[in-house]
Amino acid sequence: MPSKLLLATRNKGKIEEFRRILESIAPGEIELLGLEDFPQAHEVDETGSSFEENAVLKARQMCDVTGIPAIADDSGLCIDFLNGDPGIFSARWAGEHGNDLANNAKVLESMAEVPAGERGARFTCAAAFALPSGEVVTRLADFEGEILFSPEGERGFGYDPIFKPAGYSVSSAQLSPQEKDQISHRGKALRAIAPDVIEALKSLG
């Protein structure tokens, strides 16, 4: 029987992305649950000052609430010209949490006069895995690229339509899910933490 693992999010895009990656690493070994499976689990206030602190907060609290090993990520877009913003505020950059269109529009407006060659940016992801024992493991990963001048592509979510990965001629939103998983910040962080997750879940039986 697959081991249960809680992904501490209600973001369907993230859940599907994590499920694909975990399945590619450990097929059939992990049953991935989301917060929609636990009505009693409330959103965690992201009061940390870094991606890593926020990921640990979410993983620990959701593990405590459900009693199930939990993995959480905190990720965001860090733009050189904006001194690393929107950073940990990426999901609510335009004021409303999760409004991708408004967030993208605000970034493009802020970057309107910035020429090509000076639009460097990266996605950063911190993944945290929390066990009922209190143990927590974290991993960090980056996804380098630049900000486009207008949205391109219909895939992905968040800032994908305005982000062009380094070495590519298309946006993240124009990549197939499998292509994106191989190079994205979230894919890298999850693959880095996956051996710890699988080993811990096996030891729990």
Image (tube, grey):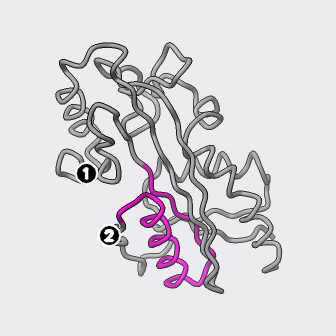
Query: Is 20 in front, or is 127?
Result: 127
- Of pointers 2 and 1, the one earlier in the residue sequence: 2
> Is 179 covered by the magenta stretch?
no
SS at badge 2: loop
**Which residue shows up at 57% across the image and 52% down it?**
140
Q: Is residue 25 left or right of residue 41?
A: right
Question: Does 198 appear above or below 57?
Answer: above
Please tell me whether residue 72 belongs to the stretch shown in magenta. yes
Residue 101 shown left or right of residue 19 in the figure:
left
Q: Quadrant of the C terminus?
A: bottom right
The residue under label 2 is: 47
Q: Quadrant of residue 162?
A: top left
Pointer 2: residues within 10 angstroms few (<14), some, or many (20+)? few
Q: Which residue is mark 1?
A: 92
Foreground of the two, 181 or 183: 183
Q: Quadrant of residue 118?
A: top left
Residue 156 is left or right of residue 161, and the answer is right
Of 19 and 181, the residue lying toward us? 181
| Residue at x-position 67% and y-position 47% | 21
**Amino acid at dot 1:** Arg
The residue located at (82%, 72%) in the rendering is 202
x%, y% of residue 88?
34, 53
Q: Which residue does the image show at 58% across and 32% down from the upper left?
A: 180
- When asked about the image quadrant of residue 185, the answer is top right
Residue 174 or residue 88, whichever sits in front: 88
Type of the residue with mark 2: Thr
**Highlighted magenta segment, given as a residue range:** 49-75
